[in-house]
Image (spheres, rainbow, N blue to C red):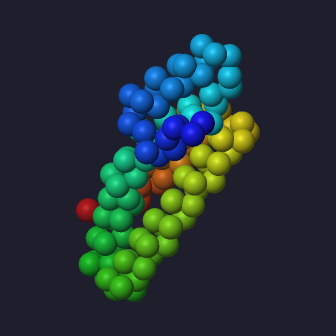
Amino acid sequence: KKGMKDPSEMTYRELKEYVERLREDGYDPTRYVVDLHAKVAFPFLTLIMVLMGSPLALAASQGRGGGIAQGVGLSMVIGFVYWMAFAISVALGHAGTLPPLIAAWAPNIFFGLMGVFFIESVPQ
């Protein structure tokens, strides 16, 4: 344990090998499997935030919102909620409440669908 790195400090390959080693040794690697999936899922946050923020900016530029400041403020709030949902979902995965794949990807799917809905709701 003295020389073990934190999962956030490991590369994807190192973490995958560590998970395989834990399985071979008979330990429960659930916590590390969640981190492995989260390592892939987290970078999609930027793409999903663009999906969600673009319609808000377009709505503000068309005069439907409360201006650019309201669009930026709303985007920041949504970003914070998204980050919190991701953190809570990963924590539930670490606790074993959610399966690892669902824990890492559920916030992305939910907010991604919300972003698509926002894009579809912007008038042409």
> In terms of depth relative to the viewer, which is nearer, 47 or 61?
47
**Residue 79 point in image, percent of width and height:** 46, 65
Compared with residue 2, is residue 61 higher up or lower down, i.e. above or below? Answer: below
* Residue 96 against residue 83 in the figure, above or below: above
Residue situated furthest front in the rendering: 2
Residue visible at 68% across and 16% down in the picture: 26
> In the picture shown, does residue 88 fall above or below 74?
above
| Relative to 100, 28 lies left or right | right
Residue shown at the point (51%, 44%) measured from the top left: 6
Front residue of 83/74: it is 83
Q: Nearer the viewer, residue 58 or 6?
A: 6
| Residue 89 percent across, percent down from the top left | 62, 48
Image point (40%, 33%), residue name: 12
- In the figure, residue 13 lies in which quadrant? top left
In the picture shown, does residue 41 fall above or below 29?
below
Q: Is residue 30 visible?
A: yes
Left or right: 28, with 48 as reference point: right
For this orientation, the residue located farthest to the top is 24
The C terminus - image quarter: bottom left
Quadrant assignment for the N terminus: top right
- Image location (x, y in percent) of residue 98: 68, 37
Rendering coords of residue 8 (x, y %): 47, 46
Residue 105 seen from this side: no
Report the label total: 0
